[in-house]
Image (tube, helix red, strand yellow):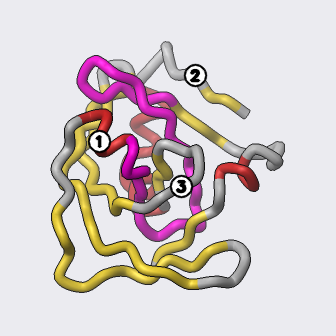
């Protein structure tokens, strides 16, 4: 099961944590959401970076803040995010995020957040 909030809702929250990671020579703005079980990327970012999305064997359920449920059926595998000297390989489910480039879910947070926070003096947190 996944959970996604819309960017329009996210912009209203005073306690959001967002990071700009480097992907190749480009930057990608990511919302950190501990309530999200998976990480998601907007299809426009997939196109912009030239990534290849593949169909998953079993689509995951995405529960929206309004109570609606939909499915995510494509994944981009092993996207390398850079933050200072730290590098992370992450899979992203492809899902339209209404203005947000990517959401990093709790699987990323549980594994990598400490390394992100201590690994870069150039880290920008937008709150």
In front: label 2 or label 3: 3
Q: Residues within 10 Å of mark 3 (few under 14, many from 20)?
A: some
| Quadrant holding the N terminus | bottom left
Indicate the quadrant where residue 94 lies.
Answer: bottom left
In front: label 3 or label 1: 1
Left or right position of 89 against 118: left
Image point (69%, 83%), residue name: 67
Tag 2 secondary structure? loop
| Quadrant holding the C terminus | top right
Q: Residues within 10 Å of mark 1 (few under 14, many from 20)?
A: few
User: Of the numbered discs in the image, which one, if any, rests on residue 47?
Assistant: 1
Image point (31%, 81%), residue name: 59
Check the image and report above or below for 81 versus 97.
above
Image point (23%, 44%), residue name: 79
Tag 3 secondary structure? loop
Q: Position of residue 24 (x, y in %)?
A: 24, 24
Residue at numbered disc 3: 97
Q: Position of residue 124 (x, y in %)?
A: 57, 22
Image point (49%, 28%), residue name: 20
Left or right position of 92 against 102: left
Mark 3 vs 1: CB contact within 8 A:
no
Q: CA distance from mark 2 to mark 3?
A: 22 Å
Residue at numbered disc 2: 124
Q: Which residues are magenta?
A: 20-44
């Amino acid at each position: 099961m996944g959970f996604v909030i819309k960017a329009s809702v996210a912009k209203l929250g005073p306690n959001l944590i967002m990071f700009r990671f480097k992907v190749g020579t480009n930057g990608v703005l990511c919302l950190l959401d501990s309530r999200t079980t998976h990480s998601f990327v907007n299809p426009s970012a997939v196109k912009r970076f030239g990534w290849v999305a593949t169909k998953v064997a079993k689509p995951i359920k995405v529960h929206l803040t309004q109570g609606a449920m939909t499915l995510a059926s494509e994944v981009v595998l092993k996207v390398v995010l850079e933050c200072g000297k730290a590098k992370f390989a992450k899979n992203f489910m492809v899902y339209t995020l209404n203005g947000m480039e990517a959401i990093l879910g709790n699987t990323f947070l549980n594994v990598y957040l400490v390394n992100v926070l201590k690994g870069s003096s150039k880290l920008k947190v937008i709150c």
